[in-house]
Image (cartoon, rainbow, N blue to C red):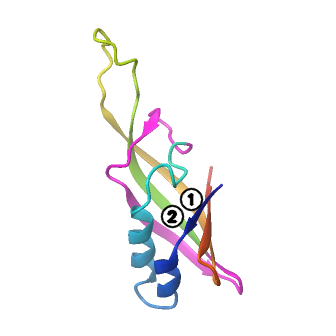
């Protein structure tokens, strides 16, 4: 489980642009801050390029805001990088879904990769 601080998204809670704010804020994080490496299905190394977030569902409780997000990103199959390595370094499209739990007091957010 990863932990983020989503202050902009929490500030936008209750406004019509909440999902857009959440999406933009998530797209600013790197692969090290999101569980993208663990969510890979075709590549072996997640890249910080071409990260796109889609908000799938949002619910609230007294203590937190829960959101499910789909994340589109790219990865590569890393070879040995030897001069005679025939493996091309082609980017592969990747997709994973995460569950976010945003604390309504602190904006601390747990991020869990979904199966």
Residue 111, placed above or below residue 42: below
Relative height, residue 66 to residue 36 (above, below):
below
Tags 1 and 2 touching, CB below 8 Å: yes
Q: Residues within 10 Å of mark 2 (few under 14, many from 20)?
A: many
Which residue extends farthest right? 62
**Could you tell me which residue is drawn at 52 percent across and 73 percent down?**
6
| Residue 63 location (% of width, % of height) | 71, 83
Q: State the residue at coordinates (37%, 55%).
A: 51
- Label 1 and label 2: CA atoms lie apart by 5 Å
Q: Quadrant of residue 46?
A: top left
Q: Sequence order check: which comes first, mark 1 or mark 2?
A: 2
Q: Quadrant of the N terminus?
A: bottom right
Describe residue 20's horizontal placement relative to residue 60 as left or right. left
Residue at left 62%, top 72%?
108
Across and down, in percent, residue 3 comes to: 61, 62
Point out the stretch of residues depicted in magenta.
38-65
Residue at which label 1 appears: 98
Give the labeled residue for mark 2.
69
């Amino acid at each position: 489980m990863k932990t983020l601080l989503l202050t902009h998204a929490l500030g936008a809670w209750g406004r019509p642009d909440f999902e857009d704010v959440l999406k933009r804020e998530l797209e600013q994080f790197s692969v090290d801050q999101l569980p993208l490496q663990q969510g890979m299905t075709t590549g072996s190394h997640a890249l910080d390029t071409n990260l796109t977030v889609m908000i799938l569902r949002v619910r609230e409780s007294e203590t937190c805001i829960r959101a499910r997000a789909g994340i589109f990103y790219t990865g590569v199959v890393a070879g040995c990088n030897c001069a005679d390595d025939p493996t091309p370094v082609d980017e592969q499209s990747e997709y994973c879904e995460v569950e976010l739990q945003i604390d309504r007091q602190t904006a601390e957010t747990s991020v869990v990769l979904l199966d």
